[in-house]
């Protein structure tokens, strides 16, 4: 079998750093041999980072600043182990948890990645991701007060409990702050000033000395603002290949102002020449510039956001007080207030005669609504029979937006000190996250119908906002997560074996959690057309205890063992072990390995009371898509109205949407994993080190519902899961028009999907394996200090679970979204008052399809779509960031970052709905003033 090759970027870095190590040998300066021992992420026993038997990467405040990241989520996005699959607030307009961002390590999802701040949990976001997973909103953590970030690339449930399957991200903030510091920064695209426009400012202050005065108090407040822009603003910037794959980006809509009449003359119409003929013509009053081919058009892209604007306020405050020579009391507050506006396309009438379906999750039944036609005698109906008006409600554009807002806090207090031979840390705290969504977009089934039919709504005029707010009422949902906790941790030296200590750590924790998520009453009453509701609540008490032991087995070998038990007082329980070995055959080499288990407790949304439903959007219907594409081809040969109908026909088979319902399951078990890691750390010189670690993780009892693509592909084998309706009036109308145009009899063989139902079950498995490497060098010379580093995440395998055939799925590595290689190289140089450097990030290309079931983008699918040779792939991506910093005065620092230094453009992807290709050179300027 052919061995996979390292990318040229990684090879270059390895060669460069190895060569530079010889320079380091000549230039190394004498440094202290002792290292400070602290609690390193993944253990409750104090030790230096170089002694740990686990793969922990530590990034300092300087490392974070060098990336130029304005937010913590931006910095975590630069980690090679961050697969980027977690929820992002940038694309959350249609998410149940809009306005928040998570993190996923090693393709195990946000539910398999634990986020800590100063070693303790943060509140979960007020909404659950996908109505299922509780997760930490990393946008709520201030970035400019972070001291360092430690990433444990290993399972740690034996130490921290639930969620620590794929790894742990520990955000460690500054403390013992004195003086005052002001930070300001802004970014902007170098070519188009409205792109990448963000601003941030923070004020940090502290007073008191722990050594001299016995206390310290500090506070930090941080503001962040991002400007949004419209889809129409970026249309001139979109390359031809993108517009070819997303032709609707150039389209205007016949759902316009003052609209277009649509329908058919009655079969018994008085004029036989018109009887049964199709009507599609502009309503009176259309602006001449908007008239084309007898129809009135509307640019709906000018209303929706390509990037949503966002505003955030985050804060951190705390204090420490010496109670005695051995004991210190501490308190900490963290808070955030975040708002993100997602402007959407303005609503339009839906007068094609097709019922709009949605699932009433409270009554447990389907609901439907058909847009009314204008009755005979209506002021806007010039015909002698009912007629449809294809209309856009442009009266008050700014009211049609989805506002995602959240507030959260964590407040804790505790004491740490020495009690006999024990180092003790005890704390209690409370935390809460509250989230809300509000929007005006969907119809009230009663008020909308009455306003149209009665004539209260005046077409072609600006109507009072109060009327629009009745027709499209405010709707949305609210959610809240709360937790109270108390914990106790203690460690001590038990004895000595030779000259090495045997260390023990013990601890216990008690947590009470509550979560609820509820749609507004008008949704739960099924008044809002085609919008499904959620009503979930739950609470639980959990108790846990752990023990950790570090035992030297001679001068060169150490065994670490940990055991933790977690128990829901009314439900699940989990006992999680961990064993690690660290062997140092020579002082320069540490060989390490870990065998552990992990678990994720079922979330409160998965086990609570109530139920939820949602819409699945943009799916391929295997039983209708091929027919839809044939229809599209024929309709494109017709008139302007037919060309609009062509896009509709394709969407009816290849981009379908349908509701789904899911109910919680109180009998769920925790998800479990078996984790294995093995590697080494080679300290070639005092300045140069290389860490390489292999990992393999198998997760079972995964909680979920059946994969939608797989259910649709195997619909006939899974009887009853897919519910279909009869052929719609729109289906029949399109078939009739195709008959008129081509003489062919072409129509859908089955009706559209109505719904898919499910309940959460322990039904899935997954496994992932790979290799991580981290190379770091730092050495001093007569002219200054040089730095070099490289990170590599090499993925070997990533498998899901085939629920139909009951076996592991294909290996997704190398398919879209799962690149085999993610790497980064960093080079830097600094003197006393200035520094400069560069970071080069590389992601290896993949196939265009996400898997075998992605039939549109497999090799066969690409051939059927006439994709150019070699185009059935996602190209590799390499980007360079330059940074520079100068201290012109003692208390002032100025910084510059240039992202995408070489102004590389987004690589071509021959598939629709890719991310907007707006890559360009971006400049960031920053300053810090200290007093």
Image: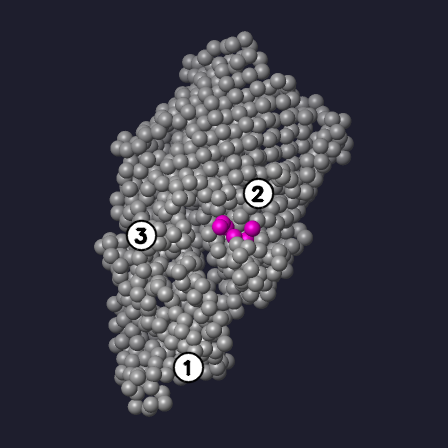
Which numbered disc flags the more N-terminal residue, 2 or 3? 3
Q: What element carries label 2?
A: loop
Q: Which residue lies furthest to the top in this view?
A: 498
Q: Mark 1 points at which residue?
A: 282
Image coordinates for residue 733, horizontal then vertical, percent? 36, 74
Q: As rendered, which of 810 and 508 lies closer to the eye?
A: 810
Image coordinates for residue 78, horizontal then vertical, percent? 56, 43
In front of the other: label 1 or label 2?
2
Alpha carbon separation for disc pair 1 and 3: 46 Å
In front of the other: label 1 or label 3?
3
Q: Which residue is drawn at 34% across and 81% down?
A: 264
Magenta stretch, main secondary structure class: loop
Alpha carbon separation for disc pair 2 and 3: 37 Å
Q: Which residue is drawn at 50% across and 33% down?
A: 696
Residue 616 seen in this snapshot? yes
Q: Name the residue under label 2.
A: 820
Quadrant occupied by the C terminus: top right
Q: As rendered, which of 179 and 635 lies closer to the eye?
A: 635
As displayed, is residue 688 above or below residue 750? Answer: above
Q: Is residue 125 magenta?
A: no
Q: Which residue is drawn at 56% across and 65% down?
A: 244
Q: Mark 3 points at which residue?
A: 719
Specify whether 548 is left or right of 815.
left
Which numbered disc flags the more N-terminal residue, 1 or 3? 1
* For the residues bearing labels 1 and 3, Cβ distance under 8 angstroms: no
Magenta segment: 847-852
* For the residues bearing labels 1 and 2, Cβ distance under 8 angstroms: no
């Amino acid at each position: 079998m052919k061995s996979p090759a390292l990318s040229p970027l990684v090879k270059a870095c390895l060669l460069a750093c190895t060569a530079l190590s010889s320079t380091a040998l000549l230039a190394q300066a004498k440094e202290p041999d002792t290292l400070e021992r602290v609690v390193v992420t993944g253990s409750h026993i104090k030790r230096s980072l170089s002694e740990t038997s686990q793969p922990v990467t530590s990034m300092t405040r300087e490392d974070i600043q060098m990336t130029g990241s304005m937010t913590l989520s931006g910095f975590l996005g630069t980690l090679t182990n961050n697969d980027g699959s977690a929820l992002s607030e940038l694309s959350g307009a249609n998410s149940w948890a809009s306005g928040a961002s998570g993190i996923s390590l090693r393709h195990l999802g946000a539910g398999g990645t634990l986020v800590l701040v100063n070693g303790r949990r943060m509140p979960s976001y007020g909404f659950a991701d996908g109505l299922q997973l509780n997760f930490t909103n990393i946008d709520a953590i201030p970035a400019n007060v972070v001291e360092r970030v430690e990433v444990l690339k290993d399972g740690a449930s034996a130490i921290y409990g639930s969620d620590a399957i794929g790894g742990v991200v520990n955000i460690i903030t500054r403390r013992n702050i004195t003086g005052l510091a002001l930070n300001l920064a802004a970014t902007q695209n170098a070519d188009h000033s409205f792109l990448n426009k963000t601003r941030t400012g923070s004020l940090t202050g502290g007073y008191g000395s722990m050594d001299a005065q016995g206390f310290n108090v500090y506070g930090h407040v941080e503001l962040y603002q991002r400007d949004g822009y419209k889809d129409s603003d970026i249309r001139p910037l979109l390359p031809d290949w993108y517009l070819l794959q997303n032709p609707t980006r150039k389209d205007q809509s016949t759902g316009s102002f003052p609209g277009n009449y649509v329908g058919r003359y009655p079969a018994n119409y008085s004029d036989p020449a018109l009887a049964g003929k199709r009507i599609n013509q502009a309503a009176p009053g259309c602006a001449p510039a908007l008239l084309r081919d007898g129809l009135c058009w509307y640019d709906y892209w000018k209303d929706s956001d390509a990037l949503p604007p966002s505003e955030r306020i985050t804060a951190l405050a705390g204090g420490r007080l010496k109670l005695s020579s051995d004991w210190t009391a501490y308190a900490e507050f963290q808070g955030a207030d975040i708002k993100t506006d997602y402007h959407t396309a303005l609503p339009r009438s839906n007068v094609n005669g097709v019922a709009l379906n949605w699932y009433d999750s409270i009554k447990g039944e389907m609901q439907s609504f058909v847009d009314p036609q204008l009755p005979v005698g209506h002021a806007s109906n010039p015909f002698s029979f009912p007629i449809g008006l294809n209309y856009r409600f442009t009266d008050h554009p700014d009211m049609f937006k989805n506002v995602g807002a959240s507030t959260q806090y964590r407040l804790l207090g505790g004491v740490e000190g020495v009690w006999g031979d024990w180092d003790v840390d005890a704390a209690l705290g409370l935390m809460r996250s509250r989230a809300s969504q509000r929007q005006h977009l969907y119809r009230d089934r009663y008020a909308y119908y009455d306003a149209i039919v009665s004539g209260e709504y005046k077409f072609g005029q600006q109507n009072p906002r109060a009327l629009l707010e009745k027709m499209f009422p405010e709707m949305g949902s609210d959610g809240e997560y709360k937790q109270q906790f108390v914990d106790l941790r203690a460690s001590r030296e038990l004895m000595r074996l030779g000259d090495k200590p045997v260390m023990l750590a013990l601890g216990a924790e008690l947590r009470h959690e509550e979560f609820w998520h509820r749609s507004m009453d008008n949704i739960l009453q099924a008044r809002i057309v085609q919008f499904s509701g959620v009503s979930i609540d739950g609470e639980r008490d959990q108790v846990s205890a752990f023990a950790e032991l570090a035992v030297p087995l001679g001068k060169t070998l150490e065994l670490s063992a940990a055991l933790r038990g977690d128990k829901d007082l009314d439900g699940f329980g989990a006992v999680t072990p961990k064993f690690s070995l660290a062997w140092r055959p020579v002082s320069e080499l540490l060989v390490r390995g870990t065998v552990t288990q992990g678990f994720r407790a079922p979330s409160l949304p998965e086990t609570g009371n109530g139920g939820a439903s949602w819409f699945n959007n943009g799916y391929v219907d295997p039983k209708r898509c091929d027919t839809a594409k044939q229809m599209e081809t024929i309709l494109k040969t017709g008139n302007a109205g037919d060309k609009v109908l062509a896009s509709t026909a394709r969407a009816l088979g290849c981009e379908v949407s349908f509701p789904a319902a899911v109910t919680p399951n109180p009998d769920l078990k925790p998800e479990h994993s078996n984790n294995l890691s093995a590697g080494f750390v080679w300290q070639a010189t005092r300045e140069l080190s290389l860490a390489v670690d292999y990992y393999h993780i198998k997760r079972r009892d995964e909680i979920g519902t059946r994969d939608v693509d797989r259910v649709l592909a195997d619909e006939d084998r899974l009887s009853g899961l897919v519910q279909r309706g009869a052929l719609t009036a729109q289906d029949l109308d399109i078939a009739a028009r195709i008959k008129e145009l081509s003489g062919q009899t072409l129509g859908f063989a089955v009706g559209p999907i109505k719904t898919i139902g499910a309940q959460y079950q322990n039904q899935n498995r997954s496994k992932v394996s790979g290799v991580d490497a981290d190379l770091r060098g730092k050495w001093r010379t007569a002219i200054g200090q040089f730095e070099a580093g490289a990170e590599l995440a090499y993925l070997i395998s990533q498998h899901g679970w085939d629920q139909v055939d009951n076996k592991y799925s294909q290996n997704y590595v190398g398919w879209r979204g799962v690149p085999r290689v993610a790497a980064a190289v960093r080079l830097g140089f600094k003197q006393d008052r200035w520094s400069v450097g560069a970071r080069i990030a590389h992601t290896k290309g993949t196939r265009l399809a996400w898997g075998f079931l992605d039939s549109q983008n497999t090799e066969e699918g690409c051939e059927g779509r006439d994709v150019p040779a070699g185009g059935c792939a996602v190209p590799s991506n390499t980007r360079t960031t330059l940074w520079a910093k100068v201290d012109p005065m003692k208390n002032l620092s100025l910084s510059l970052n240039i992202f995408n230094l070489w102004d590389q453009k987004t690589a071509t992807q021959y598939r629709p709905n890719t991310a907007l290709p707006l890559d360009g050179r971006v400049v960031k300027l920053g300053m810090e003033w200290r007093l």
